[in-house]
Image (cartoon, rainbow, N blue to C red):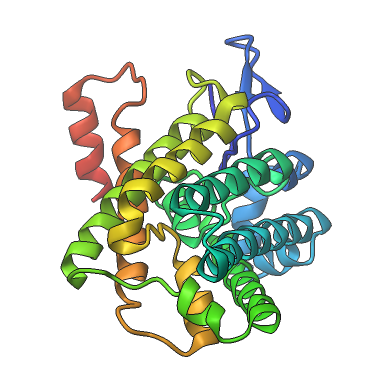
Amino acid sequence: MARREDDSYTNGSVFEVSVEEGRKDKSEAFADVVDEHPPEADEADDADGLGVCAMLSSVPFIQQLIAEFLATFFLIFAGCGVITVNQKNGMATFPGIAVVWGMTVMAMIHAVGHVSGAHINPAVTVGFAVSRRFPWRKVPAYVVVQMVAAIIASLMLRLMFGRSNEVASVTAPTGSNVQSLVLEFIVTFYLMFVIMAVATDDRAVGQMAGLAVGGTILLNALFAGPVSGASMNPARSIGPAMVGNKYTSLWVYILGPFAGAAAGAWAYNLLRPTDRTLGEITNSARRNN
């Protein structure tokens, strides 16, 4: 069954029917469901430089960007906000902070997953693109919107809580940079691995995507938080860093998540069902290279 160019957590809320297989296919982009012109037309438009302009001015794509902005803003506002509140009175506790991050992601997946895919994370967007589950032409707009949302949320928290928010919400290694880099790579790898399963594989139960992804973030935060801060999201680290003008070890939270997400997406593709032999797969890879 052929999939569309990008996927989401919806698994049935937006779908297309395969006549040959007679079953539903998960799809991510609301805009792609509305868009009915053939792929050949898209390629011709892109060749003339018109396809991107048409995409940027389309109402469904603008809706996707708005959804990504709102979801990313709420994630950073709630997640970094609870860290600041806990620093002031200690009532949230460390497990409570992890729960807030996981629950926020779960809520946003259910709220906008059927609209934009609820990436809420530049590393996830790039991971989908690397695995050919999201069009590269949409990546820059998604990443810019996610970054802007993170910066605005961080600014809002600074206005509310003052400079104390800068120290509390900025991610920084408690050990060495290498230790945090490896940890960020691993936790983001498994986050993207889970996302690929519930968002792009028909064998997975897509309705449980919010719980699966939110639970993964909660678990990662519980054991990686004390070491690296468990960012898993470049926007989550860049937003507070820019507002607080604190860029120490920021490269760790850019390189680690991007590399981990790309590797996690690639790794899950190895588990996809196929009727081809190992020799056919190897020959195909050689031709592509």
Which residue is more in the foreground, 96 or 141? Answer: 96
From the top left corner, tell me how far across and down residue 110 is, in percent: 68, 38
Would residue 256 be found to the left or right of residue 278 on screen? right
Residue sitting at 52 percent across and 58 percent down?
121
From the top left corner, tell me how far across and down residue 172 is, in percent: 34, 73
Residue sitting at 59 percent across and 64 percent down?
76
Q: Is residue 94 above or below residue 46?
A: above
Name the outermost residue toward the bottom.
Answer: 245
> Can you tell which quarter of the image residue 49 is in?
bottom right
From the top left corner, tell me how far across and down residue 271 is, in percent: 31, 26
Mark yes or no: residue 262 visible: no
Residue sitting at 47 percent across and 39 percent down?
195
Residue sitting at 66 percent across and 66 percent down?
52
Q: Is residue 224 above or below residue 10?
A: below
Would residue 167 be found to the left or right of residue 107 on screen? left
Mark yes or no: residue 197 visible: yes
Q: Is residue 67 above or below residue 267?
A: below
Which residue is more in the foreground, 94 or 125? Answer: 94
From the top left corner, tell me how far across and down residue 139 is, in percent: 54, 62
| Total number of numbered discs in the rendering | 0
